[in-house]
Amino acid sequence: MVLDSTSSMIQPDYDRKAELIAFDETKTGVKGLVDAGITEVPRIFLIPASNENIKSSDPPLLLPRPTLPTIDLNGINEDPIRRKEVIEKVKDALESWGFFQIVNHGIPDSMLEDVKKGVIGFHEQDSEVKKEWYIRDLLSQKRKVVYNSNFDLYAAPVTSWRDTCECMMAPNPPQPEELPLPCREIWPEYSSCVLKLGGCLLELISEALGLHPTHLLEMGCAEGLLVLGHYYPSCPQPELVIGSPNHTDNSFITVLLQDHVGGLQVFYQNQWTDVPHIPGALVVNAGDLLQLITNDKFVSSQHRVLANKMAPRVSVASFFSTNMIPTSKVFEPIKELLSKENPAKYRGTTVNEYVAHYAKKGLDGTSALLHFKI
Ligand code: OGA
Ligand code: NI
């Protein structure tokens, strides 16, 4: 590594850009490297020793280790006392962790299995067929489905050991033939269940803020849904790379389905804590846009995914956000939550302005929210 005196950025002493382009041009992502039988990871993936932000060694552990709350949604629509208890738990979790898991959420196990199978089916299909879906220039937007490796390939300081296939599933869902075959049936089915669940979660979150149950829905927090099917190939040298660097999500909320392999961690009380796999559970987290409209009451926490040697890992992340769809609706801290003592901390922004800033910056370990601070 050498220090570039003009930008004071650490620049690698190899032509990183050329190697990123060569990787991009394979159109087969990280999975393509593993299929080719590499035993050492290419240097674009190596975490620079200088980049403490990406994979800092853990500070001493707090004992007992904190455990991420799991909230049982059973009975919330029938029993007002249960509902109140759950709202209290949601409030506590979003104020501290920014994350929680849910069980009895109403999406059957068989559907969770099928959507994971669809993502595996996409990433493990014949690479010549898969290549046809590879696209980098998102602004051309000719296609609803985007498959590539590292959405921020040219902006991020470190390349993630991860490939992704994603599609906006709301407000304008794709026609079935626009979806890759392995996901064609299940993605629309799963998305409609996640939209319904998200509506229910946003009601609980509104109530946890002391607002009318439909407040966040009426603001438009459930208008868009971006579904991402991530694939983290098994890695010959997992300790040298990162599956996903620490980041926060640019959504209102994210509903995440992870498999049994593990590796997801959330930064809580100054240490990385595992998000354990609970069969049938879903992980819910607040994104930056929820932190912005709640004026920091609910936190969009840093999280990351470690790479591993044992097995490929899949996850399905459902982002409640209209993402890059141009809209004129401005989101700003909710008036009812503000007071003289608690003035607005952020300026208003549109979702697409926020997401564009987030993408341009790339996952560099800093929060995109800072740019919108008053
Ligand atoms: C994300 C994310 C975690 C995972 O998509 O933003 O954090 O487990 N995914 O894949
Ligand atoms: Ni995330």
Image: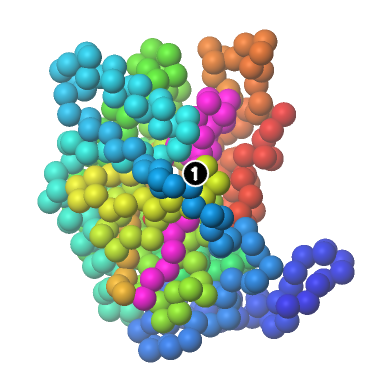
Residue 105, horizontal then vertical, whole percent: 21, 36
Q: Is 11 rendered above or below residue 99?
A: below
Residue 40 visible in the picture: yes
| SS at badge 1 | strand
Using the image as rendered, state which of residue 1 and residue 349 is in the foreground: 1
Q: Is residue 246 left or right of residue 65?
A: right
Q: Is residue 348 left or right of residue 290?
A: right
Q: Amino acid at mark 1?
A: Tyr
Residue 121, horizontal then vertical, whole percent: 24, 67
Q: Residues within 10 Å of mark 1 (few under 14, many from 20)?
A: some
Q: Say which residue appears at 33% left-offset and 79% top-offset.
A: 127
Residue 33, horizontal then vertical, whole percent: 42, 82
Is residue 297 highlighted in magenta? yes
State the image quarter where residue 115 is shown.
bottom left
State the image quarter where residue 364 is shown.
bottom right
Q: Say which residue appears at 12% left-offset and 51% top-offset.
A: 110
Highlighted range, magenta: 284-309
Residue to which mark 1 is pinned? 268
Q: Is residue 215 left or right of residue 103?
A: right
